[in-house]
Amino acid sequence: METESMAGVRPDSGTRAQLLAITERLMSAAGYEGVAIKDIAAVAGVRPAAIFYHFPTKADLVAAALDASVKALAGRLAELDGQHADPMARVRAFIDYFGAVKRARNEFCFAGVLAASCKGLPENVAVGVKQFEEQIAEWAAGHFREAFPDLSGDMVRAKGEAVLALAEGALLVTRMSGDQAAYDRVVAAILPRLVER
């Protein structure tokens, strides 16, 4: 098996991290079926064989990229928890952060794009999508539980899922319209009611 890049350098952990980032960026725009290994290799400046050195299949590459996204998101959520004493302030900060990062890169959410075709995804990729999406909904639900301890479990869960839907939906409207301000308008219309009792 060929294990060298076009520059003749053996792939390393830096190449692996680069491949994960490129995979996320390309699939955020074109989805799972819209991106081939050769596309990722071309952007990375490596031969396709260099990708297979790290990842036996395309599904393994995408699952690893999702795992990296889940870990990065967990770190960011922990930071938000440490920055805000009020649980609803944490939820608002997440919505702001999520939109700012994606709009700065003019991307939709990686997991959100893949979730749209969830039924046709390889098993390990579908699991990664579910982990990413559940992480947001469960984190948000925990903050609603903290802020409103007398809410029913079903209502807490629904509010957590609504945070996920708001973040993903506002990005979708922004992407479809090409209007970067659309995210803020959607959030302003929905978030104040969501964070109320």
Image (spheres, helix red, strand yellow):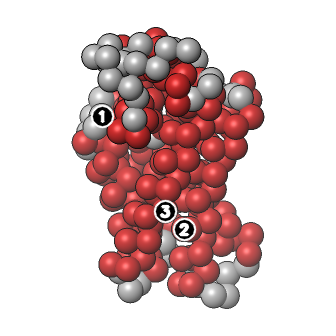
- Identify residue for label 2: 140
Is residue 6 among the parts visible in the rendering? yes
- Identify residue for label 3: 74
State the residue in front, 36 or 103: 36
Crowd rating for badge 2 (residues with CA inside 10 Å; few <14, some 14–19, many 20+): many
Is residue 189 among the parts visible in the rendering? no
Looking at the picture, how far across and down is residue 120, in whole percent? 72, 24
Residues marked 2 and 1 touching at CB (< 8 Å): no
Give the label on residue 197, or none. none
Looking at the picture, how far across and down is residue 130, in whole percent? 66, 47
Mark closest to the chain's N terminus, 2 or 1: 1
In this rendering, the answer to whether 94 lies above or below 3 is below
Crowd rating for badge 1 (residues with CA inside 10 Å; few <14, some 14–19, many 20+): some
Mark closest to the chain's N terminus, 3 or 2: 3
State the residue in front, 56 or 89: 56
Give the SS element for disc 3: helix
Looking at numbered disc 2 in the image, what kind of residue is underneath it? Ala
Give the SS element for disc 2: helix
Which of labels 3 and 2 is toward the front?
3
Crowd rating for badge 3 (residues with CA inside 10 Å; few <14, some 14–19, many 20+): some
Looking at numbered disc 3 in the image, what kind of residue is underneath it? Ala
The quadrant of the picture occupied by the N terminus is top right
Q: How many marks?
A: 3
Looking at numbered disc 1 in the image, what kind of residue is underneath it? Asn
- Identify residue for label 1: 106
